[in-house]
Image (cartoon, grey):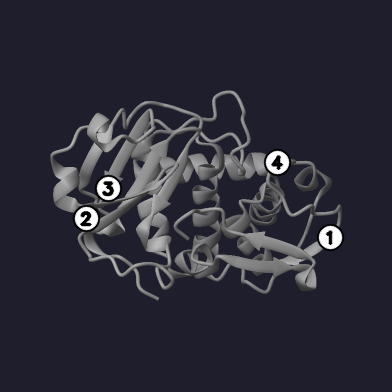
Amino acid sequence: MKILKKITAAALCLFIGITAVSADMIPFDAMPAWSEEQIVINTDDEIILSSADVAGMTMAQLDIKAGSMLLMDADTGKVMYEQNAHEQRSPASITKIMTMLLVMEEIERGSISLQDKVTASPHACSMGGSQIWLGPNEVMTVDELLRAVAIGSANDASVALAEFISGSEEVFADRMNRRSAELGMTKTVFKNASGLDEDGHVSTAFDIAIMSRELLKHELASKYSAIWMDSLRGGKTALVNTNKVA
């Protein structure tokens, strides 16, 4: 797998509704062989720019349809480009970056394993939106639920994992906020594990870049996020990554 490095390893956070792209999570096997000094920006159309291009450009010149934006080098934390990067907005499903981060940290601590079985609660099954249609008391492994989150942005799988780790989504959200504070995400407040709209559930492009950079430290997270197509339930439930550059 060819992964773009250096500047292209940056976490690119575009607030439109809100989307985030991190080049370290993107497989490029089936795509043109861009150089290591090129950046892929995923908006309505793919835009390929060199680092030199970006350095002196304004938001208008880039023509990115985003109210808030930040480009951060994932290795150094250096901010390469920003616009309204500290403006609070609803993070939507980018919330799941923190959910995945906490799960990855639990796995690396040995507190849970990919083979652990998780029983879906009625609350997890009631999420709606992007989902894998978990049924009450349905059992899936941590591995299966993580794939559902990373590939399909499944709200029900996110909440099932949150409850498995913390007992309830509310307690898990408290933990998300504690971890955010530890990382220096000063303008982020999480109210749930999925990113479904809720009053006071906010973040910024800058804070999202911080947690994206932290998640990239976990190779397993990059592995899951690089999957384009997969399935669950013996092939009955398809998982398709909707990221245009995945």
The secondary element bearing badge 1 is classed as loop
The secondary element bearing badge 4 is classed as loop
Q: Position of residue 196 (x, y in %)?
A: 63, 36
Q: Give the amino acid at mark 2.
A: Thr
Q: Which residue occupies 37% across, 33% down?
A: 186
Q: Where is residue 17 in the image (x, y as percent from the top left)?
A: 50, 33
Dot placed on the residue nearer the N-terminal end, 4 or 3: 3
Please name the residue that numbered disc 2 is placed on.
76
Please name the residue that numbered disc 4 is placed on.
129
Disc 4 to disc 2, how far (Cα)? 36 Å
Is label 4 in contact with label 3 (beta carbons under 8 Å)? no
Q: Give the amino acid at mark 1.
A: Glu
- Closer-to-camera residue (228/106): 228
- Closer-to-camera residue (225/177): 225
- Closer-to-camera residue (149/170): 149
Q: How crowded is mark 1: few (under 14 residues within 10 Å), some or many (20 or more)?
A: some
- Closer-to-camera residue (73/210): 73
Dot placed on the residue nearer the N-terminal end, 1 or 2: 2
Dot placed on the residue nearer the N-terminal end, 3 or 1: 3
Position of 172 compared to 210: left or right? right
Please name the residue that numbered disc 1 is placed on.
138
Please name the residue that numbered disc 3 is placed on.
72
Res. 185 in view = no
Q: How many labels does the image show?
A: 4
